Amino acid sequence: MTLDALTFTITNRQGETVALAVVATQARYASTLSVRGGRIDRRFATPAMWREIEAEIAVGLPKSALPPSSVLTRLLADVNERQTVQWLHAAPVEVERPEMAAEALDGHLRRQAVELRLRLKHEVPRDVS
């Protein structure tokens, strides 16, 4: 079976990317991972929140940061840190059996983090003078 995995960046007040998130509504899966690596933190939503998430996605996700009132922002960001959530892209993730969905999506999230770290490492710093 193929799951649609939506990848998001999470940035802090200074505009630095601090984490990535992956959401797959078909698997009721949402997790974050610091760009420095480490453990994956699962984010749990109620059935009502999943319905809101599906509706938000169906309308279309903006290329800019999601508003603080967005259910995805409330699920993925640390509101105390005033983090923002921005949608990056969607990608298919193949899963052999439903019980393997979390493992496959965890692997996808880790690969996305590696790719982001490589991109950030090779970015040319902007001149702010």
Image (cartoon, rainbow, N blue to C red):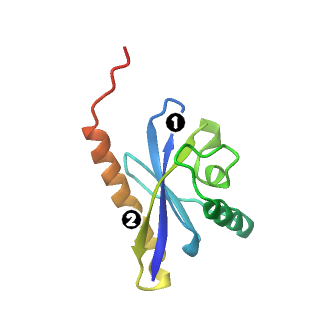
Q: Quadrant of the N terminus?
A: bottom left
Q: Height in image: 53 above or below 3? A: above
Work out which residue is located at the far left of the displayed protein and give it.
122
Side of 93 where 25 appears, left or right: right
- Rounded to the nearest angstrom, the CA distance separating label 1 from label 2 is 23 Å
Side of 64 where 111 appears, left or right: left
Q: What type is the residue that disc 2 sits on?
A: His
Q: Height in image: 29 above or below 120? A: below
Q: Position of residue 5 (x, y in %)?
A: 47, 66
First in residue order: circle 1 vs circle 2: 1
Please report the residue visible at 48 percent of the width from the left and 33 percent of the height from the top: 15
Residue pointed to by mark 2: 108
Work out which residue is located at the far bottom of the displayed protein and give it.
97
Label 2 Cα neighbours within 10 Å, binned few <14 / some 14-19 / many ≥20: some
Does dot 2 land on a helix, a strand or a loop? helix
Label 1 Cα neighbours within 10 Å, binned few <14 / some 14-19 / many ≥20: some
Is residue 1 or residue 42 the one in the foreground? 1
Q: What type is the residue that disc 1 sits on?
A: Asn
Q: Are marks 1 and 2 in contact (CB under 8 Å)?
A: no
Mark count: 2
Q: Position of residue 11 (x, y in %)?
A: 50, 40
Please report the residue visible at 41 percent of the width from the left and 60 percent of the height from the top: 109
Please report the residue visible at 49 percent of the width from the left and 83 percent of the height from the top: 98
Please report the residue visible at 46 percent of the width from the left and 47 percent of the height from the top: 19
Residue pointed to by mark 1: 12
Q: Position of residue 55 (x, y in %)?
A: 68, 64
Q: Position of residue 23 (x, y in %)?
A: 53, 63
Does dot 1 land on a helix, a strand or a loop? loop
Is residue 116 or residue 127 the one in the foreground? 127
Q: Quadrant of the C terminus?
A: top left
